[in-house]
Amino acid sequence: MEKDLIYVTDDDPGIRELVAEYLEGQGYAVETAEDAKSLDALLALRPPDLLVLDWMMPGEDGLSIARRLRAQPGFPPIIMLSAKGEDIDRIIGLEVGADDYLPKPFNPRELLARIRAVMRRQAPAASALPASPARLVKFGPFAVNLDARTLARDGAEIPLTSGEYELLEIFVTHANRALSRDWLMDQLRGFERDPFDRSIDVRVNRLRKKIEDDPANPAYIRTQRGQGYLFIPQGKS
């Protein structure tokens, strides 16, 4: 079986070597890059299954790279690394399209846990059964294909990050139920987090921009004050 390929981009050679050695010991294929130029050279050869990306680098920084990759179809899931550990920095990283964010210094085991969580969300469910009609969930002009893990509007596919898709799948399979922020974060991440982590709100806002005609006045994903969020598949009547 071919190993999952991870690109690690960081201007610190010590971090590149440490992360690469650790991940290779966990069964991944790893390539490293010191900056945007060397990363682009790797991407031209083969897209990775996941990208570990440092925020602060000379030249084009990680945020710019994430924005650029997010605009491309089929871009890989991204875990952002940064010495910036403030909540606002994590929110900015998520807003530009990163699937997760890990402040430096970090334990390689935690990075591994987050890589596995992101890749579980990204991978389609394996099945040995014969082909069968796709499981579709429809709302408004949208159709969510639960087997292909895609979202389409009037037949045109809408690009989603793995985190955005995972959140959407949770909403469409738990429609008309108030879902707390804590419960949503537990479903999405599955590892220890700050009790005041509000990154779920960033993820919801990103998803709203994909499916709402007016994200500031949402028809499908509504905020329940003091409770969390409620997905209404029929939209506003």
Image (spheres, rainbow, N blue to C red):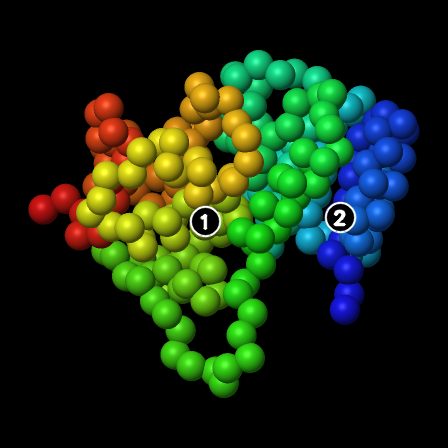
Indicate left or right for 69 with 152 as reference: right
- Disc 2 element: strand
Determine the CA span between mark 2 and mark 1. Answer: 21 Å
Q: Is the N terminus in the top left, top right, bottom left or bottom right quadrant?
A: bottom right
Q: Horizontal and vertical percent for residue 77?
A: 61, 46
The quadrant holding residue 21 is top right
Disc 1 target residue: 166
Camera-side residue of 114 and 169: 114
- Disc 1 element: helix
The quadrant holding residue 134 is bottom left
Which residue is painted at 58% across and 53% down in the image? 120
Q: Taking the image as drawn, is residue 57 in sight? A: yes
Q: Which mark is residue 33?
A: none
Camera-side residue of 89 and 41: 89
The furthest residue to the left = 237
Dot 1 surroundings within 10 Å: few (below 14), some, or many (20 or more)? some
Q: Horizontal and vertical percent for residue 73?
A: 58, 53
Q: Taking the image as drawn, is residue 205 in sight? A: no
Dot 2 surroundings within 10 Å: few (below 14), some, or many (20 or more)? many
Question: Above or below — where is 52 with respect to 121?
Answer: above
Question: Above or below — where is 165 with respect to 59?
Answer: below
Which residue is painted at 57% across and 14% down in the image? 86
Which residue is painted at 44% across and 53% down in the image? 158
Which residue is painted at 55% across and 79% down in the image? 128
Q: Horizontal and vertical percent for residue 4?
A: 74, 56
Tag 2: amino acid: Ile
Disc 2 target residue: 6
